[in-house]
Image (cartoon, rainbow, N blue to C red):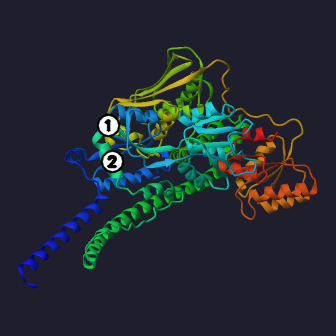
Amino acid sequence: MQGSPFYRLKGLFVALGLWVFTNVALAATAAQSRPIFSTHERQWMRDHPTINVLAFDAYAPMSFIDNKMNFSGISADLLTLIRLRTGLNFAITDVSSLQAVREKIAAGRADMVAGIPVNRLPELRYSRVWLTSKYVMLIRNSVYAPKTLDTPSKMSVAVREGTLMARYLASHFPHLRLVETSGLTESVDLLAAGAVDAAIGIEANAEYQIQRVGQKLVRTAGVLDVNPMHIAFGVSSRQPELLSIINKVLNTIPEDDYQQLGSSWHYQGGAFLQRWRTHFWQIGFGAALVLALSLLWGVSQREQVKQRTRMQQLLNEARDDAVASSLAKTNFLSMMSHEIRTPLNAILGILELQIKQNVQVQRAQPMLEVAHDAAKNLLAVVGDILDISRIESGRMALEPSVEELIGLTRSVVLLFEEASDQKQLAIRFTVEGGSRCLLKIDPYRYKQILSNLLSNAIKFTHEGEIRVILAHHPTGAGQVTVTLTVNDTGVGIAPEDQAKLFNPFTQFGLHGETLHRGTGLGLFICRTLCELMQGELALTSTPGKGTSVSLTLHLPAVNGPGQQQNSLSTPQATQEGGKRVLIVDDYPPNLMLLRHQLEFLGHQVSEAQNGEEALELWQTQHHFDYILIDCNMPVMDGFTLAKQLREQEQRRGVARATLLGFTAIAQAEVIEHCLAAGMDGCLFKPCSQEEIGKWIK
């Protein structure tokens, strides 16, 4: 009977049913992780293999540019997943403002934006939301910090400028003093430095920023009772196929993984939790059929889990490497700043002292001034390197004041006349349109841009002239449009090299040849400063004929007196009763410099080379009006010395001396540590005689 046609036919149908059911089950399982694209979408992907993506360069952890100038963050992880699922490649362009996004999308130079609040720009179409985060209030980690926005006192709150949250706070909490910033990174820095009482941001970004500055300084006070922020990909309305493709890939990601996105990107790193999903198939077949289906399903699922695990491991390793590299670079820059600024302090101070005390020595005077200028140029190089660190961390900020722009520009041009005369080049400054007026601008950053442009023009011009043209025209509503142009008759730049000039560490001469040594950071910093000022920087050049660089700014006009420019005038020695000053520094040249600077100002000076020696000296003759303390010393550092001095002053009931920190690490965190240790202020090396005189009177 077993060999009859009936049983053979029955066995055939059973086998056929097993094969059909197994393949249907595998197809259903695969559909959960592999998107199904239409024929039109597949053809579109073949026709558009590379997608131009805009990414905010300081929007951690959603998106940011790390120290290797690589695109990182949650959106970078998702784009990697989309690339693996579709084969599309993504060309990343970093931007720093919504205005830049709007211009590039409108010009057709970008197809999508990586990580942007939904409906922030009406000209975009938005993908499925992949991150939802509540708004939180951040405060300093202090018992005196405000806990809510309803406090009766007038508190200052930092919030990102131009956002819905800024308008909400202004309308619902009119008693608050709002401080608008470029983003939560700047807001948290202001909060940690004590410049504001609170900061507002989304929870995902806030957790990242708290770990960046340290939980001992900043913490979360609570969640605001407002609608949360929804983050998605923004796609150009001209690319509906791209939006459909992205949504299909995002729909294959399990909901649990979306919930882990915000918590997986912390400043110290993090990892997606590996989750296994168990699927049970209910069937009416016998035990043998269930076992066969389970085995087939297990083989398919195991391979998918392996691929997913490998992908996540690669992503986590890349993220951890980016964070570790950023931390290492920050530490390196801090150490280099200390090592360079410490000897520079002695060089600059001694040269400055010689210039002021030996003006009558006509032959020595020019040489001393050249040495003084060279040391200041070296300090400017250090400043460029530290500016790069501030740019990458999103901490570059402007400090505008009221200035008269014609005089400000002329002062910079005069500084470069000697360098142009040495190369027998004429440098001409002309003013077009309008009369003298007061404008609100950051004078240091403006002079930094102009100095870099003039320096480049002189370097690459061998004959002819350099023209500096300043034009300013009122545009109404209290605004003035300023155009600063620097033209030269130098070697020029090849067209293929012009766009690369705005990349960091890049230099080109004629036909791509590097003509001069240097860091190659100048134009990159100029472009970043220009974007911070809401301006434009344009470069045109013809090889063999010359280069023209134009800076266009829209500045507010001010009615009233401008800020007086600082000058290197010799301070008068103190005529009435000098102060008793104790200086503590482990670097002998700095001790010698400080002694001469203070004695020239009319003060009585005592010295110590470490904290223990200073403490013993204070205990034997503790009547010092001022104590100038180097923060980083062997045996006992400056912070410990300050704490012990304050404790002994209180215990002995003696007069309170003014304690001033003196350090080469020019960071806001150092000021916080100085104040926390009981100091009254902090000076940064190199420190001029005028600056010391302002503190010690």
Residue that appears at 85% across and 57% down: 647
Under circle 1, the secondary element is loop
Can you identify the residue that label 1 sits on? Answer: 494
> Residue 674, relative to residue 162: is it above or below?
below
Camera-side residue: 242 or 269? 242
Q: Which quarter of the image is occupied by the C terminus?
A: top right
Seen as rendered, the residue at the extreme right is 653
Camera-side residue: 81 or 408? 81
Camera-side residue: 16 or 159? 16
In front of the other: label 1 or label 2?
A: 2
Inspect the image, locate mark 2, and give the three-letter code of the amino acid beneath it.
Answer: Ile
> Residue 295, relative to residue 173: is it above or below?
below
Inspect the image, locate mark 1, and give the three-letter code of the amino acid beneath it.
Answer: Ala
**Residue 227 at what x, y percent from top left?**
54, 41
Gap in angstroms between the C-alphas marked 1 and 2: 39 Å
Left or right of residue 572, residue 511 in this image? left
Seen as rendered, the residue at the extreme top is 434
